[in-house]
Image (cartoon, rainbow, N blue to C red):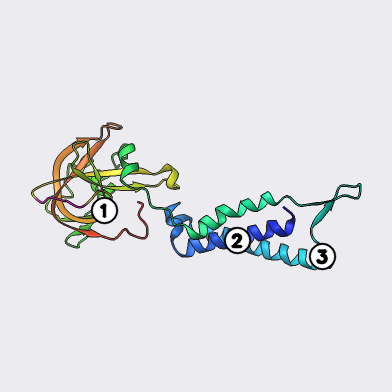
Amino acid sequence: MNRLSQAIVMLLFGGALIKTTVTDVFLRYVKAGLRPFLLTAGILLVAAAIMTIWYELRAAPAGHDHETDDGHGHAHHEPRIGWLLILPVISLLLITPPALGSYSAGQAGTVALTAGDSDYPPLPAADPAPLGLIDYASRAIFDGGKSLTGHTVQMSGFLTPGPDKKPMLARIVLTCCAADGRPIKIGLNGDVTVDAPTNSWIEVNGVYSPQVGTDPVNKAKVAYLTVTSWQQISEPANPYS
């Protein structure tokens, strides 16, 4: 590809990067904290592409068709296979990939947690208290539920089958991007039956359960929640923890 063609591809790629960042599609690929870096990269790519296009159009003589001469008077067209580079850009613009879900959670063991170095802070004053899955699991396993007892908590995630085929609440935890995602799983027990389909997103209210299970994939401990109520919800804009 000549420089003008490369600049066009770079312009489209930078534009795609900006679009996915401002529309939150990038959250399907990487953590939210990387937004400013992706947006900056997209703007720089677009700026560099525009400058290159402007320079090439000014420098190109009239009637120039971007052919090259081999030194023997034979003109050769630039290879057009280079335009295949635009296909990933088009897919980035047109296709929104699904978030990692139940299948990924079933193939990997739950996140192996480590005990905190200090006491767990009090829960939020709201009733029910909103809590992340990792925070709940840490309190339930390493604090023996002390900071959870007497409180109703509220968590959200997707449903995935447990080793006993009963539904578990899960979310994918990212270190950097979707490629390194690992699930955090919470077992569900109690008299209230959660009967939504696998991969459904739900918001669940419940109270601390002393039951602790073991994930058969990596033998990590799994905390449980006694469900008091639940409702099906839409998948959030940021499905990862």
Q: Which numbered circle lies on residue 59?
A: 3
Residue 108 shows up from this direction:
no
Query: 10 Å neighbourhood of mark 2: few (<14), some, or many (≥20)?
Result: many
Q: Which residue is mark 2?
A: 12
Marks 2 and 3, how far apart in space? 22 Å
Name the kind of residue labelled 3 in the image. Answer: Ala
Name the kind of residue labelled 2 in the image. Answer: Leu
Marks 3 and 1, how far apart in space? 57 Å
Q: Which residues are drawn in magenta?
A: 192-196
Q: Main secondary structure of the magenta part?
A: loop
* Residue appearing at x 81%, y 55% in the figure: 67
Residue 15 in percent (x, y) is at 57, 63
Residue 29 in percent (x, y) is at 45, 51
Q: How many marks?
A: 3
Name the kind of residue labelled 1 in the image. Answer: Ser
Q: Which residue is mark 1?
A: 200
